[in-house]
Image (spheres, grey):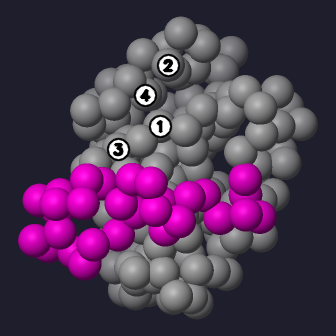
Amino acid sequence: MAHRALLVIDMLRDFIDPDGSLNCGPDGQAIVPAVAAALAEARGAGDPVFFICDRHLADDSEFRVWPAHCVAGTPGAEVIAPLAPVAGERLVPKRRYSGFFGTDLDLALRERGVDDLLLTGVCTNICVLYTAADARMRGYQVAVRRDAVASFDRRSHEWALVELERTLGARLV
């Protein structure tokens, strides 16, 4: 039987708060209740929860592509209050799109016997997609909760859902 973990990707103030420096807009705010529901389900089932969090250096090279956001130690890099982690839930800081790149996420999942991931968060076509791709390349089963992911624009979001399902074999739930 598969052991599942919930990944909450980049539900951070700079992405979700209306005044965040890289705000995903109303679609990002609209998924908060669905992500909260996924959190409640995971917590109720005793599934491990991992918050995958952009944490950039002040001079991060990613800021050549994107405006400065989620700089370590700033309020914008914090998980939004309605989804605040509880004791025992891990925050995994990342500097690139994938939650696996340059982090210990894979090790932490394997130490808990996890082989099935449920992904939620932002942005569908960026950090959710690349985390899912890296997860699949590492042999994890991947599901994406359709009502709990969003992006800057719906066209990119819809494209990513197709890519997740058809190319990566992720289950859309």
What is the span of residues highlighted in magenta in the rendered image? Answer: 56-84
What secondary structure is marked by label 2? helix
Q: Against 40, is 14 above or below?
A: below
**Element type where label 3 sits in the image:** strand
**Identity, as a three-letter code, of the amino acid under mark 4:** Leu
Going by the numbered disc 1, the residue's amino acid type is Val
Name the spot of residue 129 as percent of width and height, x first. Answer: 35, 56
Residue at 73% in and 58% down = 83
Q: Is residue 81 magenta?
A: yes
Query: How far is the residue under mark 1 from the one under mark 3?
Result: 6 Å
C-alpha distance separating marks 4 and 2: 5 Å
The secondary structure type at the circle numbered 1 is strand
Location of mark 3 (residue)? 94
Judged from the image, the secondary structure of the residue bearing numbered disc 4 is helix
Circles 4 and 2 in contact, beta carbons < 8 Å: yes
Q: Which residue is mark 2?
A: 108
Return the residue at label 1.
92
- 143 in relation to 158, above or below: above
Name the spot of residue 162 as percent of width and height, x first. 38, 66
For the residues bearing labels 1 and 3, Cβ distance under 8 angstroms: yes
What residue did someone put label 4 on?
105
The span from disc 1 to disc 2 (Cα, nearest Å) is: 10 Å
Which of the marked residues, 4 or 3, is nearer the chain's N terminus?
Answer: 3
Image depth: mark 1 or mark 2 in front = 1
Q: State which quarter of the image contains the N terminus.
A: top right
As drawn, is 150 to the left or to the right of 134?
right
Circle 4 residues within 10 Å: few <14, some 14–19, many ≥20: many
